[in-house]
Image (tube, rainbow, N blue to C red):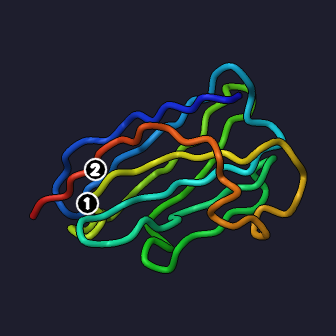
Amino acid sequence: RVQVVESGGGSVQAGGSLRLSCTASRHGILSRCMAWFRRTPGNERERVAIISQRGGATAYVDSVKGRFTVSRDNAQNTVYLQMNSLKLEDTGMYYCAATVPGWRVCSDYGDDDYVYWGQGTRVTVSS
């Protein structure tokens, strides 16, 4: 089974930027849909961004559109989340997740289809 490990979290002032990384081991990420989720204080977990198997298609939750960019490097088995113009409400734990291998359209996957999860990396945005 694939294992994913997130990194790159930290503390930043509002308006700043962070880049999160998610590196997979044991098995590659090619042919897997990949996603970033987050759990913010007082809120349910939400899917922030998804990226298709070859990186040609992405989708974002409305609250981060225009500020966050998801990308992937399959040769390096790594997925990134570039977060710009960070807001206080972006504070939370960010998780990387992967589906099983397959070539379904990633937008067809529900949250339960992401079965491989990392331990998360914390992002704290302060004023």
Q: Quadrant of the N terminus?
A: top right
Task: Tell me: 85 left or right of 51.
Answer: left
Compared with residue 28, is residue 114 higher up or lower down, i.e. above or below? below
Question: Which residue corresponds to the image point at 79% horizontal and 48% vertical from the top-left?
Answer: 53
Query: How many residues crowd around disc 2 within 10 Å: few (fewer than 14), some, or many (20 or more)?
Result: many
In front of the other: 28 or 117: 117
Compared with residue 101, is residue 26 higher up or lower down, i.e. above or below? above
In front of the other: 66 or 126: 126
Question: Which residue corresponds to the image point at 33% horizontal and 51% vertical from the top-left?
Answer: 93
Quadrant of the rendered structure where residue 80 is? Answer: top right
Numbered tag placed on residue 91 in the rendering: 1
Q: Amino acid at mark 1?
A: Thr
The reply to whether callout 1 and callout 2 are in contact (CB within 8 Å) is yes
Residue 24 position in % (x across, y down): 62, 28
Q: Secondary structure at mark 1?
A: loop
Marks 1 and 2, how far apart at CA = 5 Å
Residue 86 position in % (x across, y down): 30, 63
Compared with residue 65, is residue 77 higher up or lower down, i.e. above or below? above
Query: In terms of sequence position, does the residue under pointer 1 or pointer 2 come before the other?
Result: 1
Query: Of all residues shown, which one is farthest toward the left?
Result: 127
Q: Which residue is mark 2?
A: 123
Question: Which residue corresponds to the image point at 74% horizontal and 24% vertical from the top-left?
Answer: 27
Residue 116 position in % (x across, y down): 62, 41
Residue 15 position in % (x across, y down): 24, 63
Q: Amino acid at mark 2?
A: Val
Task: Tell me: 36 left or right of 120.
Answer: right
In front of the other: 94 or 74: 94
Task: Tell me: 82 left or right of 55.
Answer: left
Query: Of all residues shown, which one is farthest toward the top?
Result: 26
Quadrant of the rendered structure where residue 117 is? Answer: top right
Task: Tell me: 80 left or right of 74.
Answer: left
